[in-house]
Image (tube, rainbow, N blue to C red):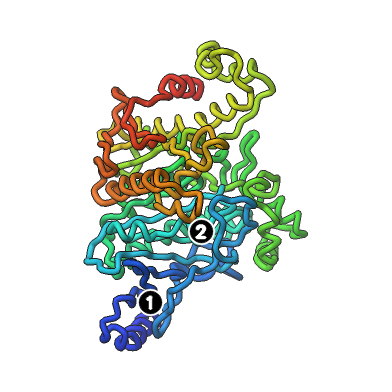
């Protein structure tokens, strides 16, 4: 810590003394200064806390830098801006604040009457690496706090702000990290938690990292990244893939057949906004482009274009290989893993007809046809949706559980099949991301007046398992049913069904075996 920061912290301590002398439990002092939070219904929350300097101006497309210390008591009562993006219409987790480029803020919830060394949970949101933020109501951490958890969420850079390469950036970085700025933000947030969470009553040696979709894929990256080593103690992956990556393995600088490098995409973007060249002047011009032009109107449905790499790149430092390859080699963090997917999850594939679709299974084509279309009457679209989800989310989750378990480490697999009663006519299963309000026990914010007692009970059960895992590394029987460790011989998972949690042999085992065989 430099002298300027020490002096600023001393000033914060002095100015915070009246509040602390008055036994104000809503004021804490962290490394960068004093914070005043808000108390509500047995929970203290601290929002909009900077964990890095604003990544704007000359700090655009640089690794995050430590925040500037402040004097006095900072009011931590409202979310900071979510990261710059074009919000996705119809998002089930709509943002609660306006997105801006200045966005590297964290939020903390803790029990109002908390002791020290409480378990910590750190959430990484999804959104395809182009959307999402920490402000949606369904991501409120109050239920976790009431259960005895110190809960943390934070923002990370998205789209071209978070995942961008250019020859000038590569030269500027030298031996430093380059390209995956959104992942760098996540690492910085985890380091911030390690350094500061004790001030909120959390145990920095009992941190559970969890996320969904792009957030789940991020968790797998940290599980398998040497850069993230030692920053967490267990992980939960919700619909985060695992076999290969969620995205094609673009490299930062090297073009491969059919896989342009991040730099190639970056040069294409620069040309699209009138910036030529590969030197410092080109980089200065790119950093001066207005934020809305960098966003470029992209969201999850429009992100596939020739001027954006799509998300994380293989950089050899943070992203070293696909998650399954790293775990197969035994090079991941040796921690307990909870992982799963929804029974009507997301997937990306197409086929003009059933014959073409089942040919993807090679020698197992006839077996796949019998499994996925036994009477030959299922609509092609429904079969594609199921196989795509199994290939992208469901089977990879099972694979990770198998690989982790084979190393003798605790692994717990789930399948989320519960559908809100108000949506059962529209949804034949649980779509992608619909487990989140149950995990957070924020179903009232999601379903409002349509919420039923059964929906609320399902949320209470799911939240209890997540909390139990964070406290001990084993979910146990927190929701009323024992959740056994995964073992490939028994292939038992916990299924969150319409009738409550059920420990059962994977009901999709035969189909997933076929999917796994076709992936080799």
Which percent across, then down, holds residue 490?
Answer: 29, 24
The tag earlier along the polypeptide, 2 or 1, is: 1
Residue of label 2: 136
Task: State the residue at coordinates (55%, 39%).
Answer: 249
Res 294 → quadrant: bottom right
Which percent across, then down, holds residue 395?
Answer: 45, 30
Which percent across, then down, holds residue 269?
Answer: 70, 53
Q: Is residue 317 visible?
A: no
Q: Is residue 398 left or right of residue 334?
A: right
Res 145 → quadrant: bottom left
Res 61 → quadrant: bottom right
Q: Is residue 5 left or right of residue 170?
A: left
252 or 202: which is nearer to us? Answer: 202
Image quadrant occupied by the N terminus: bottom left
Residue of label 1: 35
Relative to residue 72, is residue 111 depicted above or below?
above
Relative to residue 192, is residue 232 depicted above or below?
above
């Amino acid at each position: 810590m430099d002298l300027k920061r020490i002096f600023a912290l001393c000033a914060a301590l002095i100015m915070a003394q009246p509040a602390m002398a008055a036994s104000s439990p809503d004021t804490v002092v962290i490394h960068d200064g004093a914070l005043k939070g808000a108390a509500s219904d047995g929970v203290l929350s601290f929002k909009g806390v900077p964990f890095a300097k604003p990544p704007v101006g000359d700090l655009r497309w640089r690794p995050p830098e430590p925040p500037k210390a402040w004097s006095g008591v900072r009011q931590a009562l409202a979310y900071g801006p979510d990261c710059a993006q074009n919000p996705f219409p119809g998002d089930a987790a709509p943002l609660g604040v306006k997105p801006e480029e200045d966005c590297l803020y964290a939020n903390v919830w803790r029990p109002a009457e908390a002791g020290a060394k409480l378990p910590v949970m750190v959430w990484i949101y999804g959104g395809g690496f182009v959307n999402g933020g920490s402000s949606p109501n369904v991501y409120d951490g109050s239920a976790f706090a009431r259960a005895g958890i110190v809960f943390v969420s934070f923002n990370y850079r998205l789209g071209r702000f978070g995942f961008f390469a250019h020859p000038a950036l590569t030269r500027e970085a030298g031996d430093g990290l380059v390209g995956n700025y959104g992942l760098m933000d996540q690492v910085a947030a985890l380091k911030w938690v390690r350094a500061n969470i004790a001030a909120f009553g959390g145990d920095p040696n009992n941190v559970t990292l969890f996320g969904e979709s792009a957030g789940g894929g991020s968790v797998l990256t940290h599980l398998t990244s040497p850069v993230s080593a030692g920053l967490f103690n267990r992980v939960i992956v919700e619909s985060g893939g695992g076999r290969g990556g969620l995205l094609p393995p673009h490299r930062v600088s090297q073009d491969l057949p059919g896989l342009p490098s991040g730099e190639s995409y970056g040069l294409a973007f620069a040309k699209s906004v009138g910036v030529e060249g590969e030197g410092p002047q080109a980089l200065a011009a790119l950093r001066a482009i207005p934020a809305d032009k960098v966003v470029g109107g992209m969201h999850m449905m429009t992100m596939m274009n020739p001027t954006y790499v799509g998300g994380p790149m293989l950089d050899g430092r943070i992203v070293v290989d696909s998650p399954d390859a790293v775990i197969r080699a035994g090079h991941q963090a040796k921690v307990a893993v909870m992982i799963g997917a929804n029974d009507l999850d997301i997937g990306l594939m197409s086929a003009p007809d059933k014959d073409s679709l089942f040919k993807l299974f090679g020698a197992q084509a006839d077996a796949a046809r019998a499994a996925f279309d036994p009477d030959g009457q299922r609509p092609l679209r429904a079969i594609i949706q199921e196989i795509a989800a199994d290939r992208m989310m469901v089977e990879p989750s099972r694979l990770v559980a198998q690989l982790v378990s084979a190393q003798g480490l605790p692994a717990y697999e789930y399948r989320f099949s519960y559908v809100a009663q108000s949506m059962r006519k529209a949804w034949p299963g649980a779509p992608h991301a619909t487990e989140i309000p149950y995990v957070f026990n924020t179903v009232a914010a999601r379903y409002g007046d349509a919420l039923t007692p059964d929906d609320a009970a399902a949320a209470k059960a799911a939240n209890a398992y997540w909390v139990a895992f964070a406290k001990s590394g084993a979910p146990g029987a927190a929701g009323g049913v024992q959740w056994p460790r995964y073992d490939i011989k028994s292939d038992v998972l916990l299924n969150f069904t319409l009738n409550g949690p059920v420990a059962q042999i994977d009901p999709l085992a035969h189909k997933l075996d076929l999917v796994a065989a076709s992936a080799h």
